[in-house]
Image (spheres, helix red, strand yellow):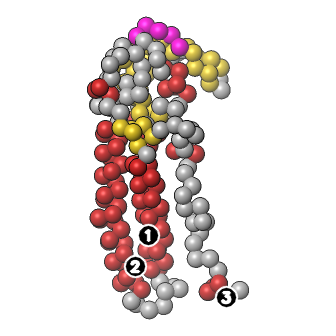
């Protein structure tokens, strides 16, 4: 078959597929902290005003050079444009359905809810500090866990001094709540 009749993209037909770790449970809202919303908005603006125009310029230049089938700048540029456009669509959809929840406005400051920074002891006696944030702003290695994660669900509604159970593949763990804060700052 001629190359002219083959599909140019590499598995791009599922443009709007959301990775499993970023999928929201059906019927839930896309909660974000004010800082998380600002970071996503900033990324969208950067893609629209800086990255995409630069790639379009390179693709335009590469296309003017002639044969596009063996032009690496053109082929890479087109692929990069698809990636940028996909990310922009994703960010736009997520920001459209976002519900910003300011941790500083929380009334029950002694109880764990969205936006709380929680210190707890695990079964090994190790103190762990996490901040409960939105799915799109979670970074577990930096102590920012999604509100739908098993740890966050176990901690939710607990108070200082409470012990909660967390089911893990290794068995049930008991987490003892040491401290609950509501600040915009990240843990540690």
Between the C-alphas of marks 2 and 3, the distance is 24 Å
- The image shows residue 160 at horizontal and vertical percentages of 40, 10
Q: Which numbered disc flags the more N-terminal residue, 1 or 2?
A: 2
Determine which residue is flagged by label 2. 59
The residue positioned 39% from the left and 39% from the top of the image is 99
Between the C-alphas of marks 1 and 3, the distance is 25 Å
Is 157 above or below relative to 104? above
The residue positioned 33% from the left and 51% from the top of the image is 41
Q: Residues within 10 Å of mark 2 (few under 14, many from 20)?
A: many
Q: Residues within 10 Å of mark 3 (few under 14, many from 20)?
A: few
**Residue 66: which quarter of the image?**
bottom left
Residue 2, disc = 3
Q: Which numbered disc flags the more N-terminal residue, 2 or 3?
A: 3
Give the structural element (helix, strand or loop) at label 1. Answer: helix
> Which residue range is magenta in the image?
160-164
**Viewed as shown, does residue 172 lie left or right of 132?**
right
- The image shows residue 172 at horizontal and vertical percentages of 62, 17
Give the structural element (helix, strand or loop) at label 3. Answer: loop
């Amino acid at each position: 078959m001629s190359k002219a009749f083959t599909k140019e993209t590499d598995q791009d037909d599922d443009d709007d597929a959301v990775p499993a770790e970023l999928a929201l449970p059906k019927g839930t809202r896309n909660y974000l902290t004010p800082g998380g919303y600002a970071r996503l908005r900033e990324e969208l603006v950067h893609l629209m005003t800086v990255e995409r125009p630069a790639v379009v310029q390179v693709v335009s230049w590469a296309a003017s050079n002639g044969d596009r089938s063996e032009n690496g700048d053109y082929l890479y540029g087109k692929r990069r444009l698809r990636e940028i456009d996909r990310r922009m669509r994703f960010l736009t959809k997520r920001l459209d359905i976002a519900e910003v929840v300011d941790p500083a406005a929380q009334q029950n400051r002694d109880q764990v809810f969205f936006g709380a920074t929680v210190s707890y002891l695990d079964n090994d006696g190790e103190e762990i500090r996490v901040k409960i944030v939105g799915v799109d702003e979670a970074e577990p290695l930096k102590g920012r866990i999604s509100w739908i994660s098993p740890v966050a669900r176990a901690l939710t509604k607990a108070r200082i001094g409470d012990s909660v159970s967390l089911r893990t593949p290794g068995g049930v763990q008991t987490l003892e709540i040491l401290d609950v804060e509501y600040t915009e700052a990240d843990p540690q």
